[in-house]
Amino acid sequence: MRKILLSHIFLLMIALVPLHQSSLAKPSSNSPSVLKQLEKESHGTLEVTWSKETNTPSMLKGRLTAPSRHSPEWIAYEFVNKKRKLFGLQNPRRDLKVVEVDRLHEKTVVRFQRLLFRTPVWEDCILVEINNHDGVIERIEATVHPNLEKRLFNRPMHPAISSKKAIDTAMSSIKGEFVKESSVESYYLATRPGTPLIYVVKLQHLSPAKMTTVMIHSVTGRIIEQKNP
C-alpha cells in the first residue's frame, strides 16, 4: 500500500512540474540583481510587468531615477545604458536610436528604435516617460528581444535580392490594384526563427485608400506576411 501511494505521489509531481514552469516568465540570470538595485533606487515605488514573449520587461513604473536637469534624451540614454543587462542590450548608445521626442505639458516621452548591426528591428522599441518638473523617469514601456547578436553569431546578414525586386514582388501580390506610391525599408524580424533580414514594403493604394504592408525575406525573396490594416 505504501509503495502504491508513493508511486501516485511521484506521478503527480511529474505531471505538475512542467505545467508550473511553463506558466511563468522567468527573468534572465542578470535580471534579479538589476531589479533589486532598481527597487532600491526607486525607494520602493517600482512596479514591473514581465513579457513572456521577449523575457524582458514590458513595463517599468515608479520613480525610476533621481531628479535631473539634463535633456530628456540624455536622461533616457543614461538609464537604459545603466540597466542594459535588464533588456539584453550590448551597447544602448549604439543600438538605440532616438526617433521621436514628444514634449507634452507634464511629461516628455522619448521613443527609441532598436537597431541590430545598424538596421532597425521590426517593432522593437523603448518608450521612456520623463516628468518635466524634476526630470525623473516615471514609466518605461518596451518591446525588446534580448541578445540578438548571439542569435546571428555576431555577424550581420546581407540581402540576396534588391529593394527594387522586393517592391516588384509586393506589387505582384496585390493583383494589379492601382498604387499611388510605395516605400521599402530593411528590418530584422526578431519574432521569427533565425531573426531574418527582411524588406518591409508599404504600398499606398489610391482607391480605395488603404495601406498594404508586405514583408519579404531578403535572401529567398519569399513573402513572409502581408497586412491590410
Image (cartoon, grey):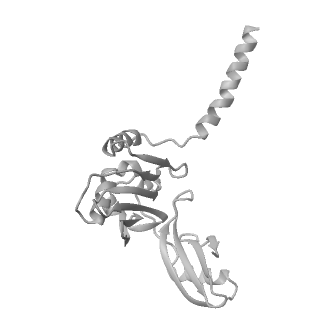
Quadrant in the picture for residue 140: bottom left
Image coords of residue 15 (percent x, y): 69, 30
Total count of labels: 0
Residue nearest the viewer, comparing 143 with 40: 40
Across and down, in percent, residue 155 comes to 41, 60
Residue 30 against residue 206 in the figure, above or below: above
Task: Give the quarter of the figure containing the N terminus.
Answer: top right
Q: Residue 147 location, x and y as percent?
A: 43, 52
Q: Where in the figure is residue 136, as x and y percent of width and height?
A: 31, 56
Q: Quadrant of residue 25?
A: top right
The one of 217 and 80 positioned closer to us in this rendering: 80
Q: What residue sits 51% from the left and 73% below the top?
A: 160
Residue at figure coordinates x 51%, y 52% from the top left: 54
Which residue: 62% across, 31% down?
17
* Residue 205 vertical placement versus 9 (above, below): below
Determine whether 218 is above or below 144 in the image.
below
The one nearer the camera, 170 or 106, is 106
Position of 174 with respect to 193 (left or right) is right
Seen at 39% across and 50% down, the residue is 62
Taking the view exactly as shown, the residue that stands out farthest to the left is 69
**202 with respect to 117 (left or right):** right
Q: Residue furthest top?
A: 1
Horizontally, residue 218 falls left or right of residue 87, namely right
Task: Pick the quarter of the image with the C terminus.
Answer: bottom right
